Amino acid sequence: MKDLKKFKNQLEDMKIELKKLNELHDHLNEERYNVWKECSQAPEDYENLKASKHSMSIECEGYKKNLKFSNDKLEQYEGL
């Protein structure tokens, strides 16, 4: 009888531990999913960043050409 009570207590303790382990496992799965989601988004973000950088570079070159053109015109008028 004494052994049976001891085993029941051990069983209850093990159930509590199992519940904690299941909660940790669920949390780990959630974290893993979040990391996977971030990693799968990274190439798209990188491509968007590359495209954005390329567009900015083209726009900057356009501004440089306009500025050079304006400076050249200004120099012509100053020379008159």
Image (cartoon, rainbow, N blue to C red):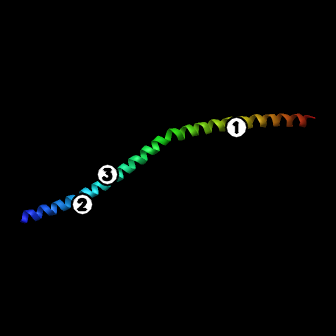
User: Which residue is nearer to you in this view: 12 or 76?
Assistant: 12
Q: CA distance from mark 3 to mark 1?
A: 50 Å
Q: Say what secondary structure mark 2 lies in.
A: helix
Dot 2: few (<14), some (14–19), or many (≥20) neighbours within 10 Å?
few
**In the image: residue 80, left or right of residue 52:** right
Residue at mark 3 = 25
Please tell me in which quadrant of the rendered image residue 62 appears. top right
User: Is residue 22 positioned above or below 37 on the image?
Assistant: below
Dot 1: few (<14), some (14–19), or many (≥20) neighbours within 10 Å?
few
Residue type for callout 3: His
Q: Nearer the viewer, mark 2 or mark 1?
A: 2
Pick whichever of labels 3 and 2 is earlier in the sequence: 2
**In the image: residue 66, left or right of residue 3:** right
Q: Quadrant location of the C terminus?
A: top right
Residue at mark 2 = 16
Q: Say what secondary structure mark 3 lies in.
A: helix
Q: CA distance from mark 2 to mark 1?
A: 63 Å
Q: Nearer the viewer, mark 3 or mark 1?
A: 3
Measuring from the top left, give residue 13's x and y in whole percent: 20, 61
Residue type for callout 1: Glu
Measuring from the top left, give residue 34's x and y in whole percent: 43, 48
Residue at mark 1 = 59
Measuring from the top left, give residue 24's x and y in whole percent: 32, 54
Q: CA distance from mark 3 to mark 2?
A: 14 Å
Please tell me in which quadrant of the rendered image residue 66 appears. top right
